Image (cartoon, rainbow, N blue to C red):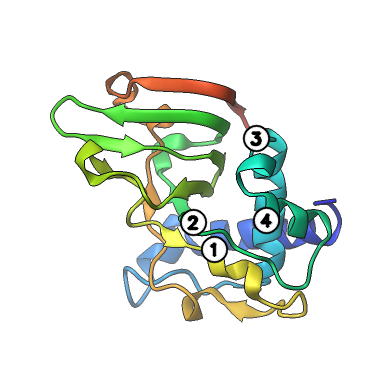
Amino acid sequence: MAGGRYDRAYADFAQNVARMTSPFARRIQIFRNEPPAVFFAPRLVAMSVLYGMFGIYPRLRIIFPSLAEDLAQNAEFIRWPDKVELKLGLTTPQVGKRGLLTSGVTMMKVLDERLVYFPFADIVFPPLIWTLTPTDTPPELGMDITRNLTNASSWVRYSQDRVNVDLRSITKNLPFFAHPFLGTDRDSWPEMHGESVIVHGMIP
């Protein structure tokens, strides 16, 4: 169901982001923190990502039944659930060509500083990282490391015919994000597993 139009839209988006965030492109960028000048189809890209996340974490159908139903029926209006966000960032250069799919894994760092990462699902395919994460994590547990990522939840509300939207018009930033599984301090992040999936490898 996520094939065809959705995957082509995602591939175009990822390729254009990679091109416009290359070291040379970033050197000539007028405003250093501005997102790349990429034109894309927000709904089609977000739908492709969500289909992938529901695929690697089937329990999402139970947690968010209305969203699952709308995705399955390709509904014109997607009912986005409360207290969850689809977030987006750029992978760090250290990731290289490593890819990662995870679901049902929560992580917390307690040494030096208290940080938390409680995603429902992650998709890391350079140059992009996507995470579906709750917004109601108790602050006393620690700072949520996804707090500065771009919120792409509203992209599903765009029309399928909107295929030429400027990324700069819908977000003010597209920050780099170091996933704990792929960072240099991997051993500092204890993890807890439920019905989890972890797939990690090199992308050709």
Secondary element at tag 4: helix
Mark 1, Cα crowd under 10 Å, few <14 / some 14-19 / many 20+, is: some
Which amino acid does the dot numbered 4 rest on? Leu
Cα distance between the residues tagged 3 and 2: 16 Å
Q: Position of residue 146 (x, y in %)?
A: 37, 49
Q: Position of residue 86 (x, y in %)?
A: 52, 55
Residue 164 in the figure: left or right of residue 190: right
Residue 11 in the figure: left or right of residue 129: right
Residue 17 in the figure: left or right of residue 69: left
Question: What residue does disc 4 label?
Answer: 67
Mark sitting earlier along the chain (3/1): 3
Tag nearer the camera, 4 or 2: 4
Mark sitting earlier along the chain (4/1): 4
Total residue callouts: 4
Dot label at residue 179: none
Secondary element at tag 1: helix
Question: What residue does disc 3 label?
Answer: 57
Residue at the left extreme of this rendering? 112
Which amino acid does the dot numbered 3 rest on? Tyr
Cα distance between the residues tagged 3 and 1: 18 Å
Dot label at residue 153: 1
Cα distance between the residues tagged 2 and 1: 6 Å
Pick the front one: 23 or 106: 106
Mark sitting earlier along the chain (2/1): 2
Mark sitting earlier along the chain (4/2): 4
Mark sitting earlier along the chain (3/4): 3
Question: What residue does disc 2 label?
Answer: 85
* Point 30% across, 45% down: residue: 144
Which amino acid does the dot numbered 2 rest on? Glu
Indicate whether 181 appears above or below 126: above
